[in-house]
Amino acid sequence: MKKNLTNNDKTGISELVESLAGPSFEGRSKKGLLLTGYVLFISFLFTFNFNTTEPFFVFLPWREAVAQGLVVAISAVATISYLTIRKEELTLDNRLMAFLMGTALILVLTIKGAGLVSLYLVPVAFATALTALFLDFETALSLNLFLAIAVGVQSGISGAIGPTIVAFAGGLVGILETRDINRMSDLTSIGISVGLVNAVLVFAFRFPALTTPFIVNLDWPNYWWAVLNGLASALFIAAAVPTAERITQITSPIGLMELLNPSHPLMERLRSETPGTYHHSQNIASLGESAARAIGADPLLTKVGGYYHDIGKMVRPDFFIENQAGDSNPHDDLTPSMSKIVLTSHIKQGLNLGKRYGLREDVLSFIPSHHGTSLIKYFYLKALREGREEVNFPESDFRYEGKLPRSKETSIIALADPVEAASHTLEDAGQKLEEMVEEQVDSKIEDGQLDHSPLTLDDIAAIKEAFIETLRAMDQRRVQNYPKERPDELGMKGPREE
């Protein structure tokens, strides 16, 4: 939810305009030069062919070299321009652009190498499926079209269309198959589907020219290369996922499922060292997952963020109420200022712990954003009481020093956290569930905690409804004073007899 600008923001806006006119312009110029060099280099690769004998590579006749280079260059520029318009955030992220450009370059080099054997061997599905896993379908489809054109160019400007169609269709299958990828074993479906589609297309292109007997004239080597293409794509994806996660700092669906495994070291520690926080995180994950589904956000990432957002509490578990046993509370021996320091430290400690266990930035972002810059109201009021209102304690001294959520997923967890905590006080307060959810969510909005969030008002309404439904489903309280004897022995009616 965007923050309205006021007159007090004039200074900040002026500084922003000056910064945009200075270093950022220089940065854009450097990026433009880099992209120009990248396009020229890829185009140059299509001015020659590798050779199995001496010389190692042979330059094409100049007319053909110019023609192929121009086709590749124009295709690359068109793809980059399209992504700049449609995916501006992607093109401004150097890390993601490096991943995309590196993936494309690897495939272009593969195309050049495969030309020595068969262009049906080019694993376009590897690049497109990997891009769909870590970026998005639209970017993957753009890359797929460019790589298909590159395969066609490698076969010659006036060459057969078969390799181009097979490359495009195989890449498209790879993109579509990523929708159901949650674990490594699921990659088998990519290999089988891509290999099967490739083989069928090779047969379709050869069928009009086939003569009897078919078995002898089926051009078997290209079939094997086409099938091997699919299997190689699946193996390459499995091998590339860890490296891609490291480069993009985005956790793949495969990695997210591994983080949800109860045997994950962090999950085991959270469960054994802070059982209260573990139970709280389970509830947050359930609330977050249902809310994410309601607004079309990523439910898997939101669920993982719910589980890991409070891992920093493992450093000093006894200072958090859900882990305290009995009436003892270590905060009773601390000043409000010291309590604030202890509570807020779980953010930094959580980030350090997450990095030590290899969590990527998309999961780590839930840690500083789930409290944002919200006020620790209990200890702020306690400080005022102990100061007998003679000392002025600014609210800023009792606020978290986190970051405001900037994605739908982190925003959902930031809302789910206070809602889950408040849900445990409903019986004592006599408050209705709907009123509590409204109060907690609206309080976050009024405090400015969603100022940088992409959530819309419709999203907020859907999230509230999802929270209410999930909390009702989680409320499985047992009947109080449950009778030890059978109902009929006490002259009482059983539940089904009432």
Image (cartoon, grey):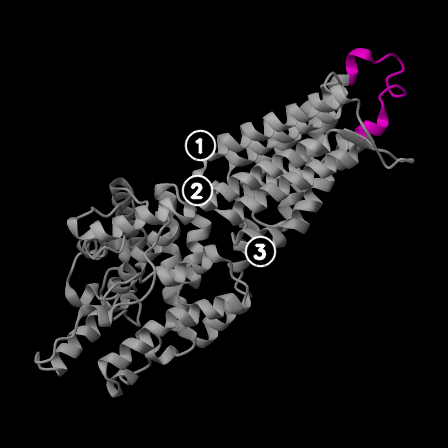
Residues 279 and 230: in front is: 230
Snapshot quadrant of residue 374? bottom left
Q: Which residues are drawn in magenta?
A: 206-223
Which amino acid is tagged 1? Ile
Q: Which residue is mark 3?
A: 246
Q: CA distance from mark 2 to mark 1?
A: 10 Å
- Is 393 situated above or below 89? below
Q: CA distance from mark 3 to mark 1?
A: 27 Å
Judge the density around disc 3: few (<14), some (14-19), many (≥20) Cα neighbours within 10 Å: some
Image spot of residue 25 (x, y percent): 42, 43
Q: CA distance from mark 3 to mark 2?
A: 19 Å
Q: Which residue is mark 1?
A: 85
Q: Is residue 383 left or right of residue 294?
A: left
Snapshot quadrant of residue 475? bottom left
Snapshot quadrant of residue 110? top right
For the residue labelled by badge 3, is the local secondary structure a helix, a strand or a loop?
helix
Residue 193 showing in the rendered view = no
